[in-house]
Image (cartoon, rainbow, N blue to C red):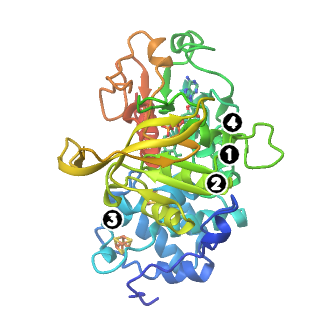
Amino acid sequence: PMANMQQHKTPMPEQAPAVRAKNFDEVACGYTESDARTEAARCLQCKHKPCVKGCPVGVDIPGFIAKIAEGDDAGAIACIKQTNALPAVCGRVCPQESQCERLCVRGIKGEPVAIGRLERYAADTAMAADTTPVVEQPTPNGRRVAVVGAGPAGLTCAGTLAAQGFDVTIFEALHKPGGVLVYGIPEFRLPKAIVQREIDALIAVGVKLETNCVVGRTVSIDELFDEGFEAVFIGSGAGLPNFMKIPGEQLNGVFSANEFLTRVNLMKAYEDTSRTPLHRGRRVCVVGGGNVAMDAARSALRLGADSVTIVYRRTEAELPARLEEVHHAHEEGVQFHFLTSPTAVLGDDKGWVTGLQCEQMELGEPDASGRRRPVRVENSAFTIDCDSVIMAIGTSPNRLISETTPGLDTNKWGCLVTVNEQGLTTKQNVYAGGDAVTGAATVILAMGAGREAAKALAED
Ligand code: FAD
Ligand code: SF4
Ligand code: SF4
């Protein structure tokens, strides 16, 4: 077929902003078959595959896009699944603009090929048609590995090892597998039914799953070795919320984004029948600028808040959230206070939040991360009236495992220290990867780390 030289991505149908701001259904509806063929024809099939270098798991991007262009959707998903076990998830939540699509040559003059949308299309089509390739049960090799945490890192490590005949058991603290994919990222961005199907397929290779098991409390890492596991992979994430340590953070109506989103997602607090209803703020302030902040703000809006304001200390250009989420938040009516830093949460005499005291910032010299450091403007204090404040200023790994495992070193942020690229920790036969090592990062980086550790274990 002829290349499509259109400079813009083929648009993806979406729910209208005014409609979707009142429901929890998925915002982006996905490409139709004809959208997908049209967009696939924008790919130039570059010999050197620059886009692939931007994908942490090395998906054969031109390979699967060629299949879509030819009308071979089953071939497209088979190609993706060689390196990515969760394409319906990644097609939706990868920060494509800073990964694969950033290096796409079509992006030099115009917009890059919509790689994420096409990946999603391939995964969704296969799911709908049930053409997901049947997994062959591997021959057992007699080796047992324990995996801690059923997030993207642990699931990928477990799935990769099980496919090679390892006897793998995942120990998960919660009652469901998925990690942040199920309790963090909201339904309107990543439908839970889709996550469940991809996870089921991954586990179907023969992975054993023990839920409601908190490693470090129910069982220790050393006890796992005593039980006969020859190695352990730790993919326990970074679920401990950070707070600002400003006055008033203990007031009623202040939440961590983590707690707020977990209640919304896992306990379905948005359904009226829910037995764990949420304090629904009328005027909500969300502090932070990442995906977590956008998700909290847009969830608060959907729960019926009159106004939702994001308070961020840098400018719009520095927002770490995915571009698409920022754009969607704007469209839905989330307000932004940029160059603003909270100094105190204000409350009434009954202990309920009444406002967020802030000061104005300006950008100074670049800091260690290369971003310009926000500095406070003298005498610029002001108050935003609100009855609820959600803190989304980052998370750290929980220290439960490191504190109960002799020989497992952490850095000053509580992240597990690894000594090589495969994720070997300072303790023999213990590997780690994902947010537990890097601090809060991305789904695909966690998956890449899980796969690297699995490779190392298989080669041992
Ligand atoms: P997690 O997903 O955190 O999984 C860790 C698992 O380990 C959990 O299931 C946990 O219950 C379990 N666990 C923890 N401690 C123990 C223990 N002691 N014993 C047993 N089990 C334990 N990334 C993107 O790429 N795109 C996005 O759009 C995006 N949006 C996000 C939105 C939100 C609200 C959040 C919170 C994160 C978002 N991220 C996004 C980040 C991404 O979700 C994480 O980087 C990724 O999930 C990390 O995977 P992981 O496997 O390392 O950890
Ligand atoms: Fe791009 Fe993520 Fe898909 Fe890789 S997995 S091709 S980075 S969307
Ligand atoms: Fe296609 Fe862009 Fe990759 Fe080239 S860089 S192969 S145009 S997706």
Q: CA distance from mark 4 to mark 2?
A: 29 Å
The residue most toward the right is 273
Nearer-N-terminus badge (1/4): 4
Residue at 61%, 68% in the rendered image: 74
Question: Looking at this view, is 308 or 129 the one in front?
Answer: 308
Q: Which residue is mark 4?
A: 176
Identify whether 197 is placed above or below 129. above
Q: Of discs 3 and 1, which sits in the foreground?
A: 1
- The number of discs equals 4
The image quarter in which residue 458 lies: top left
Report x, y in % for residue 156. 52, 41
Q: CA–CA distance between discs 1 and 2?
A: 7 Å
User: Ligand 1 near label 2 (Cβ, under 8 Å)?
Assistant: no
- Percent of width and height locating residue 1: 47, 88
Which label is found at residue 280? 1
Q: Which residue is mark 3?
A: 102
What is the distance, in whole Å, between disc 2 and disc 3 at their CAs? 36 Å
In this view, the mark in front (1 or 4): 1
Q: In the image, which disc is placed on residue 305?
A: 2
Q: Which residue occupies 55% across, 15% down? A: 216
